Image: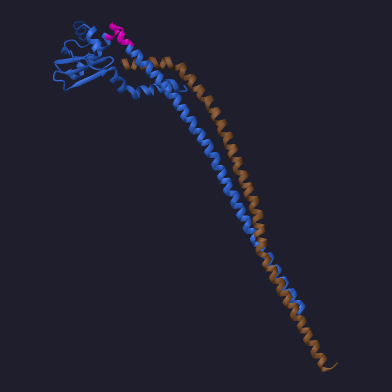
Amino acid sequence: MSGLETVKIIVDAEKEASNMLNEAQARASEIRKQIDTLVEVEREKRLSVARKEAASIVQKAESEGKSEAIRYQEESKQNIKKVLQRASANQAAAVKTLFDMIMG
Amino acid sequence: MAREKARQIVEQAENERQRLVEDAKATIAREANDILRNAQAEADGIKRREVSEARHQVKLLEQSEKDRILTVVLDEVKARVRETAGDESKYLAYIARLGADAIRQLGMDQVIVHLNAEDLKRIKVSNFTHEIDKHAPSLAKVEISKEPILASGGIVVSSQDGKVRIVNTFEQRFEALEPKLLIEAGQLLFSEK
């Protein structure tokens, strides 16, 4: 092999190595560029699920709160009814007592 | 050598991507948890508000119903007190007793008794002074004022110059006794015992 041929082989090898490194750098750069997109996609996916779940939690609470309020009001109205029935039963005695207080 | 270096460059980028994505996932998971935690807190608040509003409404309703019954009772008491004025013998004895109490409180030799227009018309002065005398014999000379007072019943006793007055009209008695009447009525009507 002549000296010229040897030099050519070395130059070609260096070119190939340089190309290989350039391609690797380009690939690495491409990989790094993907990061933002991957993160954004992941964020949108997870947060979208979380937001839907959150909306569902709030909606359920509204519904449960209304039901609980209605149940409480119905129970309380029954209690008030009893209180008023008892008051009606005591009304005549109360009138007499108060009348006696006024008349001294 | 170059191939190995190239592989390392790509591998480093891939590792970096994986690490950053994993870090981001952890951050996103925290954000998602925050969203859920806030939603849960909001949900708890909504439930509390709904029940609290219901309690408030029930309290208002209960108070309004109690007030209604109290008003009915007080109106009935007032009506019965006014009816008493129609029974002349009982009424005369009643206002005479009020008059005697007032005379004792005033502690004066001469007093003026004031009545409403209706009582001035129907009550005989001699009967009335006689009735007072039964309760407070010879304590003071009683004069009946010809000027009627504005009251549905009861009596006002004053000194001769009118500077000292003891007011015992029905209206005044209601006003003075109202706090006690309300407490007593509340206990009688709504106490669970």
Q: Is residue B157 left or right of residue B35?
A: left
Q: Is residue A76 left or right of residue B64?
A: right
Residue B60 visible in this rendered orientation of the protein: yes
Q: Is residue A59 left or right of residue B54?
A: right
Quadrant of the rendered image containing residue B10:
bottom right
Tell me the residue at 52%/39% (across/down): B49
> Is residue B85 highlighted in magenta?
yes
The outermost residue toward the bottom is A3
Quadrant of the rendered image containing residue A1:
bottom right
Determine the colour of chain A. brown
B157 vs A31: above or below: above
Query: On the rendered image, what quadrant is the N terminus of chain B found in?
Result: bottom right
Measuring from the top left, give residue B183's x and y in whole percent: 38, 24
Residue B96 visible in this rendered orientation of the protein: no
Count of numbered badges drawn on the protein:
0
Determine the colour of chain B. blue
Dominant secondary structure, magenta: helix
Tell me the residue at 13%/20% (across/down): B161
Q: Which residues are magenta?
A: B83-91
Measuring from the top left, give residue A12's x and y in whole percent: 79, 85
What colouring style does the render use? by chain
Tell me the residue at 67%/54% (across/down): A45
Q: Is residue A15 left or right of residue B189?
A: right
Of residues B33 and B104, the one drawn nearer to the viewer in this rendering: B33
Measuring from the top left, give residue A64's x and y in whole percent: 60, 37
A47 vs B18: above or below: above
Tell me the residue at 50%/35% (across/down): B53
> Is residue B75 highlighted in magenta?
no
